[in-house]
Amino acid sequence: MNEHNAGGHPLHQWTNLFAISNQRDLSITYRLLKITGLPPGDHFEKSINQLVKMVQYEIKQPVALVRREDAHFLAIPAEATLPQLKQRLMPHLATLVPGEEQYILDFGHLDAMTMPIATIFLQFALRTPLMRDQQLWGGGQSYHFKRPMGSLRADSEIDTYPGFTWSIVSLQDRLCLAVDSKKRYIDRLWLPERLNGRDAQHYLRRHCLYHYGHEWYEVQLWGLTGASVAEQYFPLEGEARDVDVLTYTRERWQANPPPWIRNLDPNSPAILYRYPGNKKDRYGALALCKLTIPTSSAEAAELHRHAILEPAARLRQSITTVERHFQHAELGQRAIHISPTPLEVERRVFPVPPQRFAQGRILAVSEVAPPEVTDRVPLEQLGRRRKRLVLDSQLGPLDVTPFDAQYLLLPQGLPRAINEDFEQRLVQAMREVSGQPSYSMRRILYNDRQTSGLYQQVQAIKGALTREGIKHGYIFLVLPERAEHDLHNYIKRTLWPDLQFQCATAQKIRSFYRSLPGQADYQPIPHLQQKLVSYVQYCAFSMMVVNRKWLWMLAAPLHYDLYIGIDVLHRMAGVTILHQQGQKLFFSNHPCAQKEKLTTREVRDILLKLLRPELRPMPERPHSIIVHRDGRTFASELKGLHLAVSELKRERLLPDDVIVGVVDIRKTTADQVRFFEGSRLQEVQNPTIGSYVVQHAQQGIVATTGQPFSFPGTARPLAAAIVEGALDIQWVLEDIFALSQLIFTAPDACSRLPITIKLADDFLEPIAGEADEEAAQYEEELPEALEEEALIEIGDKATSP
């Protein structure tokens, strides 16, 4: 797509990929170990991945998993010492059978079979100098500098550590290094200082940055041993002696001990810790721990807003990182040369699909559009026009069926004038958006005064609902001003699905009003009037989504007929079904046995239950069904999908030649590939929405957010990988982009996720997210809140990159 900027200069597109400039000169010899003894089944994948980690830890060399025909192999460097050929994977015993043949891996001639081996071997080679770099802490594909940034807030007790993530990415037959900036937030106080005499049990299972001398790494606090570091002994691996934690630590750093080792108090508590994701207990010192602070915490989130990088600054940091930290690696005694110049790619952009609103109105972003288009706008006006159409009370939504019972649940702690004004505004906004002038909500007040703790707040809300006899319906809930961080999720989770909630916070609503001098009355603040109007509109948009009243649909067919979105969170599956360009769209949730994946039977049963009633009335059977899996598809899920499709074929609900495909939608991926657009590398901006790159036949990246929409920071494209089916990757990416246009909660913004994944994100997180069940049911003092309360910032959430 050849376009120019305002100055008439042609637009270019760069990525944060850096080419391995001497790839064709690299080679290595490897051998294969055949894996036997692991029975097939739902746990096969977990076992085989565990085997890879165990062997790599044992031989201290790269290990790649290779599948050839129906067998699995481990690829290891030819010169590596063989691992133990019997590996205990309780309750199984895996046997490795070494092959006699050695293979030359020529990086200049890679194919689909050798590319994964080359990627693993190259990643291992690049990681080696990073692990030795005394300026860095971290591991794997994420490293941070030991010197924190200057304080972003003078009153903060959190240090911000800049760093980077990296990975090897394949682009057709070439390998590139992907580098992106990253920050971690660490408590400034040592954990004993943070405790200040309180019980350390409060922080069990929390992640900490462990300062083992000059080596820093992340651990999970697993328990206190009850002994001091001078008294707690443990056996040394490979040696016939026991040693205490204090002696072991001081002996390791006796040559150059940092202050926290020199000053380690012999009487300070010893701890048990584990590496994250590892079940082996290790011994350490509580005094060497500092808490890691998740970005979701209130204070870290505030720091994160100050640390957001605009596109040009982010790309400069990636360039600097490549120059300083990725020019010292070797592969097979040959230096690896990485270009310090970001890779430029051909600028390719999908057009925004036309969108159909009520009353036959069709919005299109195109100078050459079909004659049925009624609203033709340039890309810069897409969001504004879309919102204007949604708010046109003469149009209304696509779904004009009557509403079920609607309620507005307000806290008595908000002044009466604010409650009444907000109610009037919200009802009016709902009438405009719904196109139903008679729309109304029943107002209910709950007593939030003198409620402290989650238990009392839950009881106040539930008590009001019980008093009014409300058992079914849709509720707009204004949370109290001092809402506990679990309140939002707990209420949604325990009352779902009979009562479904959209939430706002009293604190946010109060911020739009001021009290009149000498009066008990409140009025909107004049210069915040427009923000208040906008905020209420976003509340109305989200209330429509809770009611499943879809505001518009796509006006043109997608490349594939029927879409199924699947996500699993904390033993709850969320499934979205979409067809007829979004005219038919619904979400359902299903309890499941495992934390993050579905069993074969669960997938089969869920899909048959949901698809049969959808397929039976169709005049024409769908010729293609695509599953969007949030994250990673498991083998058990693929098997369940095939069983369901086979049964639907036997029932003549699907044609025999139906195309079935599965696409992993990777919201958070180690690759972190980004696009940058501009006429000059030094002045790049976010990409135009719809920009895309095809990495290879099975994988690509699409920018669902970007210009012309404005938001702080740098757009994060979505990565999509075909894991099943003969699909066209370009069609897959274009459909994802089209489905991201159904951004019902913020029509004037852009959405990072296609609606197949976003509905599960919006509905599943509160009903399946972790909430403190015990604290909500029993009146006791809650620990200090470490997670950000679930506030509704509808517009901000929708536009976050």
Image: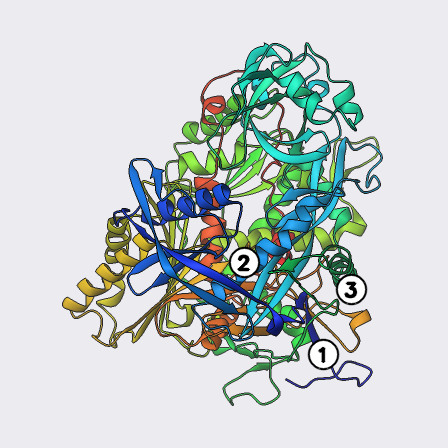
Going from N to C along the chain, the mark reached first, 2 or 1, is: 1
- Please tell me in which quadrant of the rendered image residue 226 appears: top right
Q: Is residue 237 above or below residue 683?
A: above
Q: Residue at x 74, y 70 (%)?
A: 341
Spot occupied by residue 365 in the image (x, y as percentages of width and height): 60, 80
Residue 12 is labelled as: 1
Residue 121 is labelled as: 2
Residue 28 visible in the current orientation: yes
Query: Residues under labels 3 and 2: Cα distance?
Result: 32 Å
Query: Residues under labels 2 and 1: Cα distance?
Result: 32 Å
In the displayed orientation, state which residue is furthest to the left: 650
| Residue marked by disc 3 | 312
Q: Is residue 470 above or below residue 308?
A: above
Helix, strand or loop at disc 1? strand
Horizontal side of residue 91 vs 416, given as left or right: left
Spot occupied by residue 37 in the image (x, y as percentages of width and height): 27, 46
